[in-house]
Image (spheres, rainbow, N blue to C red):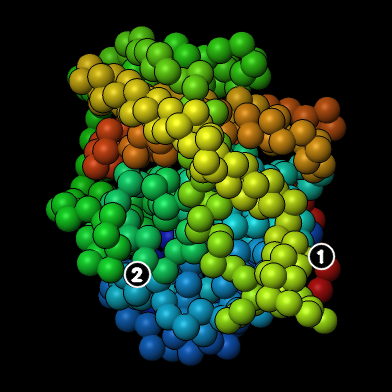
Amino acid sequence: MTKLDLPALNIVELRNLLRQREVSPGEALQALEERINAVDPKIGAYLVHDLAAATAEAEKADVTLPLGGIPIAIKDLINVEGQQCTCASKILRGYRAPYSATVIEKLRAQGAIPFGRMNMDEFAMGSSTENSSAQVTRNPWDLSRVPGGSSGGSAAALAADIAFGALGSDTGGSIRQPAALSGIVGFKPSYGRVSRFGLVAFASSFDQIGPLTKTVRDSALLMNAIAGHDSRDSTSLNALVPDYTANLGRDLKGIRVGLPKEYMIEGVDPVVKSAVMAAVKQLESLGAEIVEASLPHTDYAISVYYILATAEASANLARFDGVRYGHRAEKVSTLFEHYARTRAEGFGAEVKRRIILGTYVLSSGYYDAYYLRAQKVRELIRQDFVRAFEKVEALVSPTSPGPAFKLGEKTTDPLQMYLADVFTNAANLAGICGISLPCGFAESENGKKLPIGLQVLGKALNEARIFQIAHAYEQSTDWHKARPAFEPIAA
């Protein structure tokens, strides 16, 4: 293997080479930098990356640690001390984090090197990464299509082999949906399993940080590093964290897996449905028992999500006013004008839409009609999952109703964009864990392969079982080995 081939490796493969001293952390970083320079001008996954700072960390890396010397890309809403943290928004342009998030401290304790700030939908509000104020990110499988969102930069980087692993955030599907559309693995932990300290909040009762990787085992390794209680996050769960790699390789004999009838509805692309049903048959052949399941309040999930998440966002984003940091409007004569113009200039259209919607549902006269009622239905949705998991250990479904759509196709129709998360946001409403992994391909009109994702959901804190099921399926197929074919830019 030449140094130029290093970026194609997954975390486990690179770790083995580092431990055998066949390559150094600095050499791995240099190879990654060269690949980024050759490929990312076409993709637009990275906002910035600081090779010098990462190399300084690499020189001190202890490769005997679980993630020793491994570069990990970071979504641009997770604080890394001294690095930019803009949430892909004009209102935070130029802002540098004064401290590191707990997940960054945990990664470094395991030997990993945070490397690069990844593009995203502004403040994680979107399903295509088209809402970034900085740049467009393209899907490596078809450059005319979106990579998904909001963690689209992280997902696209992995698909294009310009990252070994990445961290993203999942509020309504923002890890799993881009993972599906980009043909990689994306994991959403149970709510409270991973500390949110140092994560810029979108909707605090939904947000979770999680890994995006090339394989299920890599995802489990990153979860081993970042999971656990944190006294600085009041929603962090004080529960024992198992070794998520321990059950990988065990068979699925006797494990009951549910297929929710509400998730195989009209509107799912026939090719997606066919691929998911083939995956279900594969799970059955591996020993799993497949049973029909029902989540009767599924139809309300999107409505409830967009009432509650926007309400929380309107409160969380009130802090961005240009007074202490970030964008500040010029030539203002009053404090009110400063606030109004700074926020009008600093926020993009989708963020403004959600702030307005959230403010509306929290306003006098509408709180009971919308917000309070939505909270009650959220509990009904949570109870649906509780009852389902009394009968099965996991639920499987498509991650997204269709493959990656074209850039610009849904930007003028917010409802169609919101429907891209129709199968993912219920898990955030219920606080459960879930994974998306590749299970096939659709074909575009120009003959390009478009990845399809299989979603596996589990009850809260049952991450280990979800990893076991996902790994068994992954290792029995070759979908995760496929990589897009495109020509890098000549040096």
Give the quarter of the image for residue 323. bottom right
Give the quarter of the image for residue 61. bottom left
Q: SS class of the residue under badge 2?
A: helix
Residue labelled with disc 2 = 102
| Relative vertical location of residue 298 with respect to residue 113 in this rendering, above or below | above
Residue labelled with disc 1 = 489
Q: Residue at x 70, y 60 (%)?
A: 347
Q: Residue at x 29, y 19 (%)?
A: 388
Q: SS class of the residue under badge 1?
A: loop
| Relative vertical location of residue 18 with respect to residue 382 in this rendering, above or below | below
Q: Residue at x 81, y 74 (%)?
A: 491
Q: How many marks?
A: 2
Residue 116 rendering spot, x and y as whole percentages: 58, 72
Q: Which mark is residue 73?
A: none
Evaluate whether residue 93 shows in this view.
no
Give the quarter of the image for residue 273. top right
Q: Earlier in the sequence, mark 1 or mark 2?
A: 2
